[in-house]
């Protein structure tokens, strides 16, 4: 698999093919900046240019936008905050954010290598990007790194292992077939060189020739099916060396593996599947013992497809025939290939990747989808988030955790003495809700700082227990009458994160300082832990603008459900800040964080989403 050399013109042509209005001058500027000097310890300048251009072409082909292309070219230049600020000034905020996130993913991988499993590392990588395009860029650059694996010398074997166990499963579920094929085989070549050499000798063909043969098979099938007036989609692929190796490990001989070359026919209906089968059998001689009708008799995991082996040019090839619905279920649903073959079974992670795949597909077809693509957030696991120390070490916390939880997770004494917290470099309130991939720094005091109100917002069991031990349980103070708030402005008002009230909700104010007021819903449970003397009456008058709200959706676990929900939200012209989802039995539970003006607008959106087929319930969270 020889490294493909390319040039800037090829990248520009690929970008133009997706967007004729792309800012080509800015892309040229990004390439010039990235190659102005070579700080790489392993690549010479020519190798660096090839690495950057091949990675960027992959991103351009995925149609992820010119911001993503520029970030790919610049991904090795953002190692300091000063450099990130320069990128922000020259190329825009979105490009700078992508570069920063790619750098963070690399640091996480390097600082947690061998300390967490590669399966968990996959989830951490997926959860890191505030803009999921950074994950796609990391995959594209990792593919180029694995192609240059010999440059890493003694580090090459560890890189191959992480690629195979952490990055390949992500590629597989995101549908990046060529990238998966390439990365898997290159890792296999490094980790099992003798086995790789044996298979290469047995196959006796270079990759390029096998790919050419598959394309010729697909062309023959397509032409014959079109003659029969059938509107079907046909594509193919040669079997990877690693997949052949896995088959041989089961005891099969090389001549018994009939899908070294394979094609797939996607039809609109079951009736067309059998019509296509008839055409295929009339075109080539079938191998009867390898015929399997999983449409008539589905597998236990509900996988459906027709498999038939044919003689073609004195070779045995496999043809799979299925409907679009079966294809989506096999690729995105519970019958996904990796669920019952080589990858670890993990329903939750499977679902998260499936949603990412749907969004990636939506991105390819919808011109206005890039903003939603940026907002997708993927969770590490059910009711868990991960955050990072300043050294990029992973800390797993319950969902809804705060800097206080993080401090206690590090050490009880740090929890007791927590005075201030920085999240992503900025001082934040100690009750701020943390999000996946936040970097937290705790500033301590020489003296204990623990306060009783901390108990009302911490989530970590250890934190709650330690605080109660330190402070004891005290009786509630005598209730005082509510005060009435005078003149107010949005500047000194903070909308509470715990209940997120919006105009139209009955509200209650809580005086956090002399001039600052936190606004909660009247039924917010956290108000019960606050001294009554600090509660104040407040109204929505004079408090306009955009407010954040969350909607909870429970829906059928079916293909395209995410795309349908996003489409309906976009029709209401409502901004989506983030999406997240959890797999529950045969359903999906997801949360959209959105920007809203008032309760009426939110109610209208809920009514629209309730009409999406497969939706069980939609409610405000």
Image (cartoon, rainbow, N blue to C red):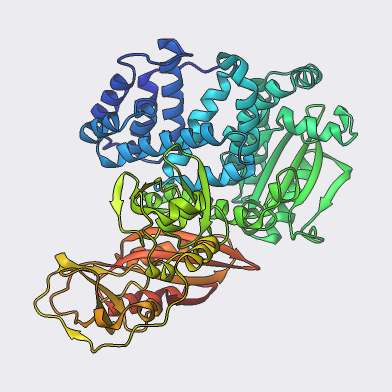
Kindly indicate the quadrant of the structure image that contains residue 134: top left
Please tell me which residue lies in front, 338 or 504: 504
Q: In which quadrant is the C terminus drawn? A: bottom left
Q: Say left or right for 580 vs 167.
A: left
Q: Say left or right for 232 vs 310.
A: left
The answer to whether 378 is drawn above or below residue 264 in the figure is below
The answer to whether 151 is drawn above or below residue 343 in the figure is above
User: Which x, y percent locates residue 297?
Assistant: 82, 61
Q: In which quadrant is the N terminus drawn? A: top right
Residue under the image location 58 percent in, 37 percent down: 167
Find the residue positioned furthest to the front: 447
Residue under the image location 24 percent in, 38 percent down: 92
Is residue 358 visible in the rendered image? The answer is no
Residue under the image location 85 percent in, 33 percent down: 249
Q: Say left or right for 297 vs 612.
A: right
User: Which x, y percent locates residue 420?
Assistant: 32, 52
Q: Say left or right for 31 vs 391.
A: left
User: Which x, y percent locates residue 342?
Assistant: 74, 42
The answer to whether 417 is drawn above or below residue 285 in the figure is below
User: Which x, y percent locates residue 553?
Assistant: 48, 71
Please tell me which residue lies in front, 213 or 595: 595
Residue under the image location 59 percent in, 56 percent down: 351
Is residue 79 visible in the rendered image? The answer is yes
Kindly indicate the quadrant of the structure image that contains residue 431: bottom left
Please tell me which residue lies in front, 429 or 314: 429
What number of labels is visible?
0
């Amino acid at each position: 698999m020889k490294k493909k050399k390319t040039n800037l013109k090829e990248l520009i042509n690929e970008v133009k093919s997706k967007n004729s209005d792309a800012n080509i001058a800015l892309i040229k500027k990004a390439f010039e900046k990235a190659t102005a000097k070579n700080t790489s310890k392993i690549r010479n300048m020519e190798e660096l240019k090839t690495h950057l251009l091949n990675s960027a072409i992959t991103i351009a082909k995925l149609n992820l936008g010119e911001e993503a292309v520029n970030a790919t070219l610049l991904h090795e230049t953002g190692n300091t905050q000063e450099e990130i600020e320069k990128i922000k000034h020259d190329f825009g905020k979105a490009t700078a954010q992508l570069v920063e996130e790619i750098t963070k993913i690399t640091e996480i991988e390097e600082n947690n290598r061998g300390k967490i499993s590669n399966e968990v590392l996959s989830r951490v990588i997926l959860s890191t990007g505030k803009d999921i395009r950074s994950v796609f860029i990391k995959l594209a650059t990792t593919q180029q790194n694995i192609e240059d694996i010999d440059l890493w010398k003694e580090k090459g074997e560890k890189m191959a292992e992480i690629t195979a166990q952490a990055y390949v499963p992500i590629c597989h579920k995101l549908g990046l077939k060529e990238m998966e094929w390439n990365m898997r085989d290159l890792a296999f070549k490094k980790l099992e060189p003798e086995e790789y050499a044996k298979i290469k000798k047995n196959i006796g063909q270079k990759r390029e020739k096998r790919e050419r043969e598959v394309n010729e098979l697909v062309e023959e099938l397509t032409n014959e099916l079109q003659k029969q007036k059938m509107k079907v989609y046909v594509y193919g692929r040669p079997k990877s060396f690693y997949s052949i190796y896995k088959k041989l490990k089961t005891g099969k001989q090389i001549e018994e593996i009939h899908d070294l070359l394979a094609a797939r026919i996607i039809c609109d209906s079951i009736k067309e599947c059998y019509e296509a089968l008839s055409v295929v059998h009339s075109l080539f001689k079938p191998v009867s013992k390898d015929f399997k009708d999983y449409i008539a008799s589905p597998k236990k995991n509900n996988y459906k497809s027709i498999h038939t082996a044919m003689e073609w040019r004195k070779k045995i090839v496999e043809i799979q025939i299925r409907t679009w619905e079966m294809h989506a279920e096999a690729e995105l649903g519970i019958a996904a290939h990796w669920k019952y073959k080589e990858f670890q079974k993990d329903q939750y992670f499977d679902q998260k990747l499936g949603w990412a795949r749907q969004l990636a597909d939506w991105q390819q077809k919808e011109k206005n989808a890039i903003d939603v693509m940026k907002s997708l957030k993927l969770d590490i696991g059910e009711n868990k988030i991960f955050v990072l120390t300043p050294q990029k070490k992973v800390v797993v916390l319950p969902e809804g955790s705060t800097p206080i939880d993080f401090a206690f997770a590090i050490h009880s004494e740090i929890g007791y003495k927590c005075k201030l917290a920085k999240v992503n470099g900025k001082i934040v309130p100690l009750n701020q809700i943390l999000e996946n991939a936040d970097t937290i720094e705790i500033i301590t005091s020489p003296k204990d700082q623990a306060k009783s109100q901390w108990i009302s917002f911490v989530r970590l069991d250890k934190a709650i227990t330690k605080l109660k031990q330190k402070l004891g349980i005290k009786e509630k103070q005598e209730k005082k009458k509510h005060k009435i708030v005078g003149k107010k402005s949005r500047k000194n008002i903070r909308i509470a994160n715990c209940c997120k009230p919006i105009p139209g909700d009955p509200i209650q104010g809580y005086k956090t300082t002399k001039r600052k007021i936190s606004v909660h819903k009247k039924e917010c449970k956290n108000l019960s832990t606050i001294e009554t003397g600090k509660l104040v009456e407040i109204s929505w008058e004079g408090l306009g603008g955009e407010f954040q709200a969350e909607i909870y959706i429970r829906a059928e676990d079916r293909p395209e459900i995410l795309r349908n929900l996003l489409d309906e939200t976009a029709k209401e012209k409502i901004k989506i800040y983030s999406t997240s989802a959890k797999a529950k039995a045969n359903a999906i539970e997801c949360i959209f964080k959105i920007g809203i003006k008032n309760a009426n607008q939110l109610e209208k959106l809920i009514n629209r989403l309730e009409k999406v087929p497969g939706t069980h319930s939609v409610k405000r969270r």
